[in-house]
Image (tube, helix red, strand yellow):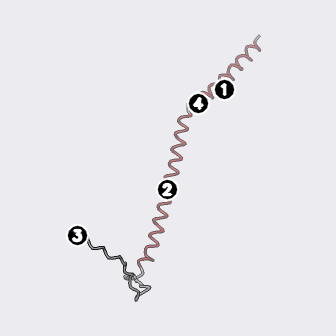
Amino acid sequence: MRRKLLIAVLALGTVGGYASGFASLRHCQKGRHQAFEQHVAKVCVDAARASDADHARAVQQAAPAQNAAPAQAPVIVNILPGAAQPAVQTAPAPAPQVQ
């Protein structure tokens, strides 16, 4: 009799423990989900900031090389210097008829 009571109490404790664990997992799911979303957002923002910093650093390093050349007016090359633009030929308008 004592042994059967001990088995029943241990079985009840096992079932209660599993039920408590599953309830805890279900209850804390929203908190874990929100924490994961915040972690992913932080990682994305950090990566974007690092990318922007790298781009700004590259532009800054390239800028002195571009500014080192003296500022000159652009060279315009006329490929056909002697050729004139063709004139558009139109037919003369007919004279108005007076009646």
Question: Answer yes or no: do the residues labelled 1 and 2 have beta carbons within 8 Å?
Answer: no
Camera-nearest label, 4 or 2 = 2
Contact, CB < 8 Å: mark 3 with mark 4?
no
Work out whether residue 71 can be spotted: no
Q: How far across and how far down the image is residue 88, in percent?
A: 37, 78
Mark in the foreground, 3 or 2: 3
State which tag comes first along the sequence, 3 or 2.
Answer: 2
Q: Which amino acid does the dot numbered 2 rest on?
A: Ala
Neighbourhood count class around disc 1 (C-alpha, 10 Å): few under 14, some 14–19, many 20 upward: few
Closer to the chain start, of discs 1 and 4, is 1
Mark 1, residue position: 18
Residue for point 37% across, 78% down: 89
Please say whether residue 11 is visible from this viewpoint: yes
Q: CA distance from mark 4 to mark 2?
A: 34 Å
Residue designated by label 3:
98
SS at mark 1 in the image:
helix
